[in-house]
Amino acid sequence: MKFKPSIKPYRGAAGGWGSLEATTRYVFDSKQPLKNLRNLLRVNKARGFDCPGCAWGDDNHSTFSFCENGAKAVSWEATRNAVEPAFFAAHSVSKLRQQSDYFLEYQGRLTHPMRYNAASDRYQPISWSAAFALIAQHIQQMDNPNQIELYTSGRASNEASYLYQLFGRMLGTSNFPDCSNMCHEASGVGLKQSIGVGKGTIRMRDFERADAIFVFGQNPGTNHPRMLHSLKQAANRGARIVSFNTLRERGLERFADPQSPLQMLTPTSSPISSAYFQPNLGGDLAAVRGMVKALLETHRQRLAEGKAGLFDQAFLEQHCIGAEEYLAQVDATTWQKITGQSGLSENQLRQAAAIYQGAKRVICTWAMGITQHKHSVATVREITNLQLLFGQLGKPGAGLCPVRGHSNVQGNRTMGIDEKAPQALLDSLEKHFGFTPRREAGHNTVEAIEAMLRGEVKVLLALGGNLAAAAPDTERTAQALRNCELTVHISTKLNRSHLITGKDALILPTLGRTELDLQASGPQFITVEDSFSMVHASEGIGKPLSEHQRSETAIVCGIANAVLGSEKLDWLALADDYARIRDHIQATLPGFEHFNQRCEQPGGFYLGNAAAELRFATPSGKAQFSAAALPEALFDEKAPFTLQTLRSHDQYNTTIYGLDDRYRGIYGQREVLFIHPQDLAELGLQDGESVEIETLWHDGVVRKVSGFKLVSYAIPRGNLAAYYPETNPLVPLDSFGDGTGTPTSKSIPVTIRRCAATPASRIA
Ligand SMILES: Nc1nc2c(c(=O)[nH]1)N[C@H]1C(S)=C(S)[C@@H](COP(=O)(O)OP(=O)(O)OC[C@H]3O[C@@H](n4cnc5c(=O)[nH]c(N)nc54)[C@H](O)[C@@H]3O)O[C@H]1N2
Ligand SMILES: Nc1nc2c(c(=O)[nH]1)N[C@H]1C(S)=C(S)[C@@H](COP(=O)(O)OP(=O)(O)OC[C@H]3O[C@@H](n4cnc5c(=O)[nH]c(N)nc54)[C@H](O)[C@@H]3O)O[C@H]1N2
Ligand SMILES: [Mo]
């Protein structure tokens, strides 16, 4: 493929012909059109496979069961291109390291287990049994069980991730860094503190009843396209959709449904948002505080006039504590501080408050624009405060909805991939399996990288993902990986993490979601959990590309068997029949009664959510307001700009499908920097000029990337945006959220200066 870089503003709506055209292009590009079309028809259907694209739920009564970006994810996995031993024989690891992430994954699917040979700087084939024995040998050489890190990426199934954490805990560690630590951690932490459960409280059908939906820091047109369908239907029946986003995102403005013949044939599209606010990066805490300040004023006015107040007094008295302290904090927060920090005027915030006030049932959704800041937990809790004041919990059409990323990231946590697992889970594992799990917290992702940097980690195991590219502070993360004795990646495709090796390294090729998983007892299905706590079966049908690929579950069992033997648990028997794993899950986790039988239900089953039933597992037994003051200042005043790192339309995290970002009008390139036109003018710079971006941080380490082309954009002054993972070298490892350890990928203090137009450097 050849690309000519260009910038053309996108005039259409999100979805529509552009999306259908792009879908068709991807389906045919992967060289397996028929298989792909058959696959797509089964995505998210009762007995098909779960879309590996995102964690949005499945709407069983709609035909809109896949979307453009889901199609890309499926086609990308179903390619017939193969990365075979001959490929590795032809390319040294140092040579491959010079290639782009896009090139690496484009080579196709990994087909054989491979071991790195430092002498020839090449990967060579190894048998599965030798690979498992090598892992066992390295683990047996560790001085203590905490010298291993077990990373997980959120695509892993419930079955594989349950056994993975069980293996780690039986080994004696709780080091389970995972992608969630870099993603929705703040949602889990904040919601747990406020309402006693770290998950969203709504179900898909609530979108059909809501009067208003507030979307904070999220770009569903690209990252959760099936959500647009729910938003559009809500907008069509008159619900108000209010977006808070630092950028003008096409998908939040207008949407043409590719499944609606009328909209495809006529140049119409549905407006999505009835109001669109562009706060400063990190300004949402102040924005919501401003809305509450306005609502509190009206509430008091009405009481003074002898009318009923605005807030749900009965709900507050019966179910909440801390409302008074919180409202005192609201009084203490000045409009000046609110408008300064949010970047929105008092008028705009009063307008948002008026829409909120006019709605009986309100849903608030959010994603990375809320969770990847320093004060993200406080922001998640502030959104919760607002909802609590109006009793927007425990009724249809209302509630809290963190929209998860990876398709099974929520399920991973439920299964115990958690470096700070609840004691109840550990008790239950202890009782059922008869061993003593470690009670102390283990490492999250940043702590794991720090431990590796200190040379304290011997073995890194990764169940999926691409830690080298996804983690912050690229140079330091690379050094961390190199410090390990052994790095092991269970992967579908070649990626950067395979090329930054420990002294010893393995790549273990795995089956994808879409493929037939045949074990001793016959074809297997796995289960996943979506953002709405629905657990359902997923069964692949495609013939695997190589007989040497194994399922994630079988690989985890193979490793565990080689390391721990079969005395305590017959791991290999579990791999023969996944129903046996589900029996163990049923015996140890709440909500999984009759697990195997309930997998047969079309659409799966609902795990339940206590907070949605107004039962709050907090210390007080009630929903707890948070009375956080706004941060002193959002950012380091010495930094002229704050940078957010985000996704283009043609990528899945570190997987780059193509070089376009259609809705933002970017074609054939990724090294671009979005900036306000007046900022450009003040700097004496012009659209299309190349700049170097440098982080301003207190540790004296130089962090910069260069060759980024400036693009004028509708973005607040002083804010910048560029794509992840190219900008990960800029995120300092020790810049993370309070109480979460989540890298602050959406607020990096930077400066920019003109430079020669060279592509950004890669790690050599
Ligand atoms: N096609 C596709 N789908 C995906 C993914 C993918 O890469 N590609 N990734 C998956 C994963 S793991 C995740 S976590 C989700 C991510 O889904 P999103 O959270 O939608 O992903 P980002 O691209 O990081 O977009 C962040 C959005 O928040 C806005 N934003 C940034 N900072 C702020 C802020 O401070 N305030 C406000 N109000 N807005 C802000 C940005 O302008 C942008 O629109 O998507 C999942 N789905
Ligand atoms: N700067 C910056 N950094 C970020 C973010 C950001 O917004 N900005 N976002 C963060 C977020 S939200 C997340 S979730 C993380 C993502 O971090 P990760 O989950 O670690 O990264 P991915 O890019 O999703 O992983 C892609 C790799 O997974 C493998 N893979 C794909 N499918 C499968 C499968 O079915 N099984 C197995 N075993 N492997 C598979 C492939 O080899 C592929 O190369 O990145 C975080 N990093
Ligand atoms: Mo994520």
Image: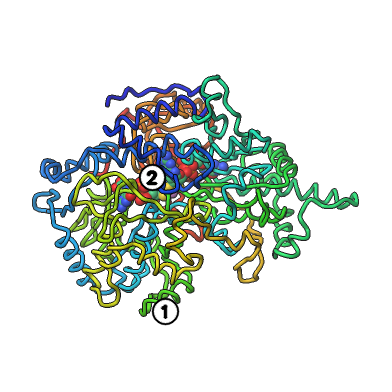
- Say which residue label 2 marks: 730
In the foreground, 556 or 376? 556
Determine crowd level at label 1: few under 14, some 14-19, many 20+ residues with C-alpha closer than 10 A. Answer: few
**Residue 276, percent from left and from top:** 62, 35
Give the colour scheme shown.
rainbow
Q: Residue 345 lies in what quarter of the image? A: top right
Determine crowd level at label 2: few under 14, some 14-19, many 20+ residues with C-alpha closer than 10 A. Answer: many
- Say which residue label 1 marks: 431
Label ID, residue 496: none
* Residue that appears at 30% across and 61% down: 452
Residue 234 vs residue 248: left or right? right
SS at mark 2 in the image: helix
Kind of residue at badge 2: Leu
Label 2 CB, ligand 2: below 8 Å?
Answer: yes
* Residue that appears at 38% across and 75% down: 438
Label 1 CB, ligand 2: below 8 Å?
Answer: no
Above-or-below relation of 10 to 328: above
Residue 191 vs residue 709: left or right? right
Kind of residue at badge 1: Lys
